[in-house]
Amino acid sequence: MSRLFIADSDQNFLSQSSSYLTLSGYSVNEFSDLASLRDTLKSFFPDLMLIARTLSDGDGLMFLKQIRSKKPMPIIVMGIDGSESERILSFELGCDDYVEKPLSFKELSLRINAHLRRMINTTVRNGLSSWILGKETLSLDLSSHEVFLDSKTIKVTGAEWRILKVLSMNYGNVISRTQLIDECFEYTRESYDRIIDTHIKNIRAKIGTSGQNWIETVRGYGYRFKGVKKLD
């Protein structure tokens, strides 16, 4: 049974969403403030977290930024106004998905299931796959979702991992934003082109530490991974 954490100051929403997701087969922990959520995370992490854009004692997005590197679990932000700026900011700070309230509990359950299914599907040990660019080696561990740049571990979100995996596995080929949306998110939504761009920007910042540009922008179409597969 997958464990979910839901953090929201709206007690009515918290109760209803928790009841629905429990009936859907999840184990759910409710949090009405960041303080209680922070204390629980000292002991254990969930398989997936849902967090409101704002809570009574703080900013959910700033909290997301603080915990993003602790564990590569999927995190879904429940936003206030659904504006493009709020969605983009949520992804820039490391969320894997964004939903706008009020929302359909059925849709929320489907999104949760999709994220958890991706996590399960990558637990089979496949060893390291590596690519070379210049003097650097970038490696992806397909079982643990870990990314290594030479000997350094690079912390990435679930969405960043999926995008980097698709691009690297298709190295040398141009991958469109539409392809990335279809393969990494399983659904389409307005402004997802911009969100893909945001994820790419974050990935570049993390793996371009020595000035290497592992991901090339192909104007008007998409992106190309420039590394060359390292032979085993």
Image (tube, grey):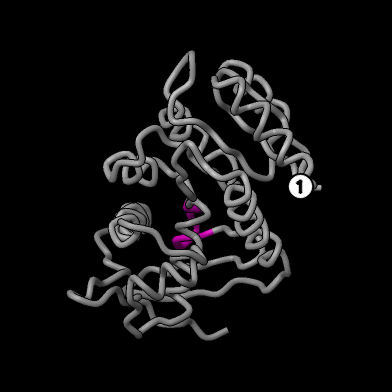
Question: Residue 189: image x %, image y %?
Answer: 39, 59
Q: Is residue 153 magenta?
A: yes
Question: Residue 208: image x %, image y %?
Answer: 31, 58
> Which of 97/141 is in front?
97
Q: Is residue 146 above or below residue 126?
A: above
Q: Amino acid at mark 1?
A: Ser
Region rendered in magenta: 147-154
> Which of 224/35 is in front?
35
Q: Is residue 27 left or right of residue 200?
A: right
Q: Which residue is mark 1?
A: 24
Question: Residue 66: image x %, image y %?
Answer: 47, 31
Magenta segment main secondary structure: strand
Q: Which residue does the image show at 35% across and 78% down from the upper left? A: 175
Q: Is residue 40 left or right of residue 210?
A: right
SS class of the residue under badge 1?
loop
> Which of 127/199 is in front?
199
